[in-house]
Amino acid sequence: MAKRQKFHTRLCDVLGIEYPVIQAGMGGFADPPLVIGVSEAGGLGTLGAATYTADGLIEAIKEIRKGTKKPFAIDILLPDSLEDMAGVDKEKLREYIPEEYKAYEKELRKKFGVPLDYHTHRQVDMWTMEGTKKMLQVCLDNRVPVIAAGLGRLGWVMPECKKRGIKTIGIGSNVKMALKHVEDKVDVIVAQGYEAGGHTGNIGTLAVVPQIVDAVKPIPVAAAGGVADGRGLAAALSLGAEGVWCGSMFLLTPEATFTEGQKDRVIAATERDAVITKGLSGKTMRQLRTEITRTWDQGPLPPLGWPLHLILMEDIIDYCYDSKDQKKYDEMLVTPCSQATRLLNRRRTTKQVIDDMVKEATQIIERDIPKRLILT
């Protein structure tokens, strides 16, 4: 048996993991197989709970625990906009969508070949504050090892997490948000740069990571945004982070919930193809451009806010996945991806991805940098 590479930081001690590599929540694309694969490989696997119901989350947690005895995380979305919708269910939320948007959605159905009578069967609880509280209660009742707030903050649930020994992760794309997580006393803070795939901020990784590291000491920080290999991990440590939070580098693994067509698109993409858009969820999101994103980015109506825009678009988005003519719709599928696209150039298992990252980072730190460094 090959000897395991040692690569340990304070982040590992806090989360109980072997390597300082946290897999991002990747809502909709990180299901139990990927979570199990990452945790078994020595990182922290994270389930993106945004596409689950409370009952589905219970089953997913059971599946993860059957597959691994190691720590894992559940990623929950808690955007501030939910607080304005307390007591409102999903169907009631539809009433907040303006009529001109409903009419435009019908035009888009015709444009993209989506039948007017098609309605998604996907059930999601995280549309409202009540639904999100149900999801959090599942996490608390099942004493999951780690809860991450992919959007928003965990302040009001922190006492219950502390009581149960559940570790917590907050994500910030600027110092102001990071300090809110400090106020909440989370265990780990992710400093996420603009280069990241999915929902992201507007400050570059190289700039935002050291600023957040300095602002939140002594809380350990994981760097995120365009980190896709060992060079990114080594750079994160140089910036003062204790590890990394990565999503895109797992997209090409067999364990990710990605079609082969989506993987082909990622491999073919350049760093300019991963664009920021509000055309899918109503929040700024980096993904490979599609006809759907072009339609909203170029008008005639601006996207609605989250979650109304996602509710408006969910039938069209889900039809692209459900259609039997999958090849026709492959280029329209939601494909979150960071700007590190040219580094995502081959299919590997999750274990290979993590092993390669750790091996490369070790070589850079121990050999490559000392060789290149000239001190006089």
Image (tube, rainbow, N blue to C red):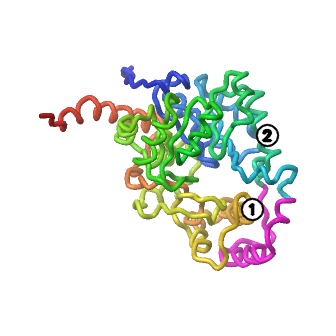
Tell me the quarter of the image containing the N terminus. Answer: top left
If you read the primary sequence from the N terminus, does the residue marked by circle 2 or circle 1 appear first?
2
Residue 117 drawn in magenta: yes
Is residue 126 placed above or below 36 in the rendered structure? below
Residue beneath disc 1 = 308
Residue at 55% x, 36% y is 189
Q: What percent of the width, then of the height, locates residue 150?
A: 62, 44
95 vs 248, left or right, is right
Q: What percent of the width, then of the height, locates residue 338?
A: 47, 53
**Mark 2, secondary structure of its residue:** helix
Is residue 351 placed above or below 341 in the rendered structure? above
Q: What percent of the width, then of the height, locates residue 218?
A: 50, 28
User: What numbered label is drawn on residue 141?
Assistant: none
- Categorize mark 2 by other alpha carbons within 10 Å: few (<14), some (14-19), many (20+): some
**Mark 1, secondary structure of its residue:** helix
Residue at 18% x, 34% y is 371
Q: Looking at this view, is 253 or 363 the one in front?
A: 363
Amino acid type at mark 2: Lys
Residue at 82% x, 65% y is 96
Residue 248 drawn in magenta: no
Residue at 58% x, 24% y is 70
- Categorize mark 1 by other alpha carbons within 10 Å: few (<14), some (14-19), many (20+): many
Residue beneath disc 2 = 133
Residue range highlighted in magenta: 92-121
Tell me the quarter of the image containing the C terminus. Answer: top left
Is residue 271 placed above or below 40 in the rendered structure? below
Q: What percent of the width, then of the height, locates residue 135?
A: 76, 39
